Image (cartoon, rainbow, N blue to C red):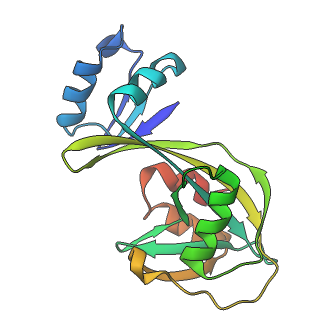
Amino acid sequence: MRLFCGEKTVTLSDTHFEVFDIKRFINFLDSKTTYEIRYRQSDLELIRKNLNYVEAAGGLVYNHRNELLVIERFGLPDLPKGKIEKKESPEHAAIREVAEECGIHTHEIVTPLQSSFHIYPHKGFYTLKKTYWFSMRYAGNEPLIPQTSEDITAVYWADRLKRHQLAEQTYPNLKSYFML
């Protein structure tokens, strides 16, 4: 399993972290030298308990031409996703977030995908974010409308060639999703 934050790959189960130590882990994050962290499943609960933890959900939405729905936020290609609200299922949150961020409403979930994890600094603390991903199908023709209140500046469909180009420009934890 992997977490993304910083510049290089480190395996938590290697010699740096023979036994998981949360204080050493936080110091390691503070060093800002990490790009990808591989960890044991058994360490995830300890990481969750010691960082702010949020869950989000999003969609890889494909149209009838097998193009992927892409948003741009903060100048980078991204995928529609957002925090799960209280008493909301990941599936419902994913459908809601796609509708809010992109302006479409007739999309449906086809299958769940592997979740992603990443760590980011927020208000002086580190936050671990788990995102549940779902493959979705959209057969409508509504105009795409970016949710500008969420800093989304563009929404568009990307064919396979464009997705490969965008994968090189997006966040590290999203690259593989652009390639699906």
Residue 99, compared with residue 140, is above or below; it is above
x%, y% of residue 60? 66, 62
x%, y% of residue 23? 23, 20
Q: Quadrant of residue 13?
A: top left
Residue 54, compared with residue 61, is above or below; it is above
x%, y% of residue 171? 42, 57
Q: Quadrant of residue 119?
A: top left
Residue 179, compared with residue 102, is above or below; it is above
Q: In the picture, which quadrant includes the C terminus?
A: bottom right
**Towards the viewer: 68 or 135:** 135
**Towards the viewer: 75 or 141:** 141
Residue, x 67% and y 75% (percent of image)?
159
Residue, x 51% and y 54% (percent of image)?
174
Residue 102 in the figure: left or right of residue 172:
right
Q: Residue furthest top?
A: 19
Q: Quadrant of residue 34?
A: top left
x%, y% of residue 30? 18, 35
Residue, x 52% and y 54% (percent of image)?
175
The total number of labels drawn is 0
Residue, x 42% and y 65% (percent of image)?
169
